[in-house]
Image (cartoon, grey):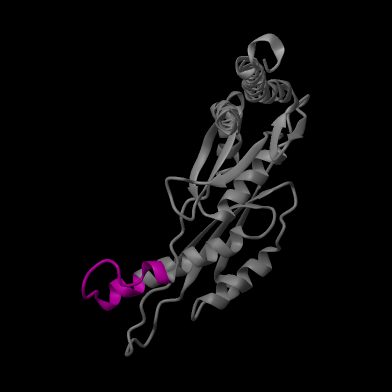
Amino acid sequence: MRVQRWVGWAALAAALGGCSAPVATALGEEDANRVLAALNRAGVGAEKEHDPSSEGRFVVLVQRDEVSRAVAVLQEEELPPRPSPGVLDAVGKSSLVPSAAVEHAQYVAGLAGDLERTLAGIDGIVTARVHLSAPLRAPLDPAPQKATASVLLKHRGATAPVAPEAVQQLVAGAVAGLQPPDVAVVLVPRPGQAASAGVELTRLGPITVTRGSAGFLRGLVALALLLSVVPTVALLVVWQRGRKALAAALQPEGGGAP
C-alpha cells in the first residue's frame, strides 16, 4: 500500500517536472534572484531550485510554453549578468612569476570588476560597465600619466536611480590618483519590461504559474491522487474477500460440533 502511494507521487513529480524547462543554470543565489525578479515583473511564472549538476548553484525554471518569452525577457534585461572577476580573482593567475606590469593590469581589471558588481547591485541598474585607465607609475617618473575612467550604466525607466556625481565619487575613491572630474559617466535609460496583457499569475502550492497552466496542473494532481487511491481501495477489497474466504474455509461443515 505504501509502495503504491510512492508510485503515485513519483508519477506526479515526473509529470510536473516534464512541464518545466530551465532558462538559466549554474547561477549564484544573487544572480538567480535577479533572474527570478525580472521574469516575475514581465508576468512569466518562474521558480528557483538548487542546480543538481552544480553544487551550491541554482537553476531557474519556467513552464515550457513560456520558454521563448522568458528568453526574450532575459535578453532584454541582459541576464544572467556576465562574470566580472574581482581583484582577488584576477591577481597572480597569468604566470608563475608575473611582472610588475602584468600584476598591475590584473589589479586594474579586478578593480573594475569589483566596481561593476557594486554599481549593478543598485536597485534599478540593469547593467554596469567600468573601464579604468590607470597607468603604472614609475618611482622616478617626473610626470606620471593621469588616471581616467569611464562608466556605462543602463537603468530602467527615464530617471537614473543614482546621480552621475555619486558614481564619480565612488569610482574615484577606489582608484589611487583618480579625480572625480576625470570619471566619465554615461547613463542609458531602458524601458521597463511590463507584464504582457492578459497574463495573470497564480500560485499552485509552492509553484507560481500562469492561470492557463493551473487547470492542467490541477488535473495532473488529481490523476496522481487517483493513481494512489485506486490501488489502495482494490487491495482492501481483495483483503476483505480473502479474509471472508479463509473464515469460511475454517468453519466446520454442518455449522457446529457433532
Left or right of 43: which side holds 183?
left
Q: Count every numbered label the image shows and give the total.
A: 0
Left or right of 152: which side holds 199?
right
Q: Position of residue 244 (x, y in %)?
A: 66, 17
Is residue 229 or residue 201 the one in the foreground? Answer: 229
**Rendered image quadrant of residue 231:** top right
Give the answer, above or below, for where 149 lies relative to 34: below
Left or right of 167: which side holds 131?
left
In the image, what residue occupies the spot 67% across and 35% down? Answer: 45
Give the answer, above or below, for where 11 lies relative to 58: above
In the image, what residue occupies the spot 43% across and 50% down? Answer: 54
In the image, what residue occupies the spot 71% across and 55% down? Answer: 160
The answer to if 148 sits in the magenta stretch is no
Name the residue furthest front.
258
Q: Is residue 133 visible?
A: no
* Quadrant of image for the C terminus: top right
Q: Position of residue 44 (x, y in %)?
A: 67, 33
Is residue 139 or residue 247 the one in the foreground? Answer: 247
Q: Position of residue 208 (x, y in %)?
A: 70, 36
* Quadrant of image for the N terminus: top right
Q: Is residue 41 visible?
A: yes
The residue range painted magenta reads 88-105
**Rendered image quadrant of residue 198:** top right
**Rendered image quadrant of residue 36:** top right
Name the residue furthest bottom.
140
Is residue 112 or residue 227 the one in the foreground? Answer: 227
